[in-house]
Image (tube, rainbow, N blue to C red):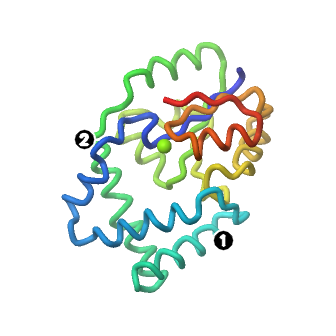
Amino acid sequence: MKAVIFDLDGTLYNKRGLSLRMVLHAPMDIRKMQAERATRASMRGMWLGDEKHFYETFFQRMAARMHCSATAAEQWYNQRYMPLMVNMIGKYQPLSEWASPFIHDCQQKGIQLVLLSDYGFAKEKLQALGLSPALFDWVISAPELGGLKPAPELMHIISERIGVAPQECLVIGDRDDTDGEMARRTNAQFRKV
Ligand SMILES: [Mg+2]
């Protein structure tokens, strides 16, 4: 094993209760949150080629569900929803117990570490969890690369960037249908947490 690709949400921290806490902190936004979830689910595994095209499609679809403009959907997502998620993670969601010792162990062994999240704000979330983004060789979100898990293109881009074949990468994640499926489609190893 030459590299580990970590998922973030539900993997490096316990996600239990997070969506309920977000609703309790912003009850007027419940329909928008549902629209975000439905949009994300409808785009699972989609590959749009780059960040610009991904977010154009994402915010257009979300806006149609929210009955607002794509610009309004984007503003809500970037200025309210994601900052609220980061805030709630920092306050209430504990870092997984195995995470720090495991990351340090990998570093000792010279194993490359990549964080691949389906959401943006990955560095902010790591900081909220008390994990320095500098612990990882690369912190990247799937949308920044142009799609969502389990699109195999994500794995191929990472593999090329770090110079390690997918067969020598271990994907660690909480979802078999996204993290696990991306690994299977590219012959990487997968371990579910
Ligand atoms: Mg996850």
Residue 113 image-quadrant placement: top right
Residue drawn at (54%, 47%), measured in percent from left and top?
Answer: 117
Circle count: 2
Q: Residue at x 50, y 19 (%)?
A: 102
Image x and y of residue 75, in percent: 41, 74
Q: Nearer the viewer, residue 171 or 175?
A: 175
* In this picture, residue 153 sits left or right of residue 87: right
Q: Residue 181 got which mark?
A: none
Q: CA distance from mark 2 to mark 1?
A: 34 Å
On screen, residue 91 versus residue 181, left or right, reads: left
> For the residue marked with disc 1, what is the amino acid?
His
Residue shown at 60% from the left, 74% from the top: 57
Ligand 1 near label 2 (Cβ, under 8 Å)? Answer: no
In the picture of the structure, the residue carrying the numbered disc 1 is 53
Q: Residue furthest front?
A: 177
**Residue 171 or 132: which is nearer the viewer?**
171
Up the image or down, 136 lies above or below 30; here it is: above
x and y percentages locating residue 130 in the rendered image: 36, 34
Q: Neighbour class for label 1 at 10 Å: few (<14), some, many (≥20)?
A: some
Q: Please provide percent x and percent y for residue 146.
A: 67, 60
Drawn side of residue 126 relative to residue 109, left or right = left
Q: Secondary structure at mark 1?
A: helix
- Image side of residue 69 versus residue 15, left or right: right
- Which comes before the other along the chain, label 2 or label 1? 1
Label 2 sits on residue: 92
Estimate the x, y position of residue 193 in percent, counting from the top left: 48, 29
Out of 105 and 6, give the one closest to the viewer. 6
Mark 1 beta carbon near ligand 1 (under 8 Å): no
Residue type at the position of mark 2: Tyr
Q: Is residue 183 above or below residue 28?
A: above
